[in-house]
Image (cartoon, helix red, strand yellow):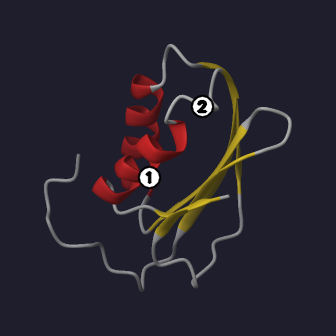
Amino acid sequence: MCADSQQPDSSAAAICLRAIFQGRVQGVGFRYRTSRLAQRHFISGFVKNLSDGTVELVAQASDKAALDEFFDEMMLTFATNVTDVSIQEFAPNPAWQNFEIKR
C-alpha cells in the first residue's frame, strides 16, 4: 500500500504492463477488486473480461516500484483464482489518468 497520500507526479515517464490472467477469474469479483487495488496504488489503465474466459489488465504507473507493489498485491489477493498470468510491456498512454473497469 502507498504510504504517501498524494498521487505521484504524472510528468514522470510512465511504465505500462499488460497482463492476461487465466483461471477462475470471471464471476468472482476480479475486476472490482483489481480496480480497488489500482486506486490504492495510484495505477491508471483498465481491466476487462475477455471472451475466452481470461481477464486483461493494462496497468500504468509513474514508477516501477508502484507497479511492482500493485502486481505483488494482485498475486496475493488472487492466488487461489489465477492458474497462469502472462505479462508484457505495453505502450504507455498519457491519456490514462484513472483506472476503469471496461465492459
Provide the secondary structure element on which disc 1 rests: helix
User: In the shown orientation, is residue 56 left or right of residue 65?
Assistant: right
The quadrant where residue 21 appears: top right
Q: In the image as oriented, which residue stretches furthest toward the right?
A: 52
Q: Which residue is mark 1?
A: 35
Which quadrant of the view contains residue 77? top left
Instruction: Please give the name of the residue rendered at 47% of the width and 40% of the height, measured from the top-left corner.
Output: 71
Total marks placed: 2
The first of marks 2 and 1 along the sequence is 2
Task: Answer above or below: position of 76 versus 44.
Answer: above
Classed neighbour count for the residue bearing mark 2: other residues with Cα under 10 Å, few (<14), some (14–19), many (≥20):
few
- Give the percent coordinates (x, y) of residue 24: 64, 21
Q: Secondary structure at mark 2?
A: loop
Identify which residue is drawn at 48% across, 25% down. Answer: 78
The x and y percentages for residue 33 are: 42, 41
- Disc assigned to residue 27: 2
Q: Residue at x 18, y 72 (%)?
A: 6
Amino acid type of disc 1?
Ser
Please name which of the two marks, 2 or 1, marks the residue nearer to the observer: 2
Q: CA distance from mark 2 to mark 1?
A: 15 Å
Q: Which mark is residue 64?
A: none
Q: Is residue 87 above or below residue 102?
A: above
> Is residue 45 toward the left or the right of residue 19 in the image?
left
| In-image side of 9 versus 68 (left or right) | left
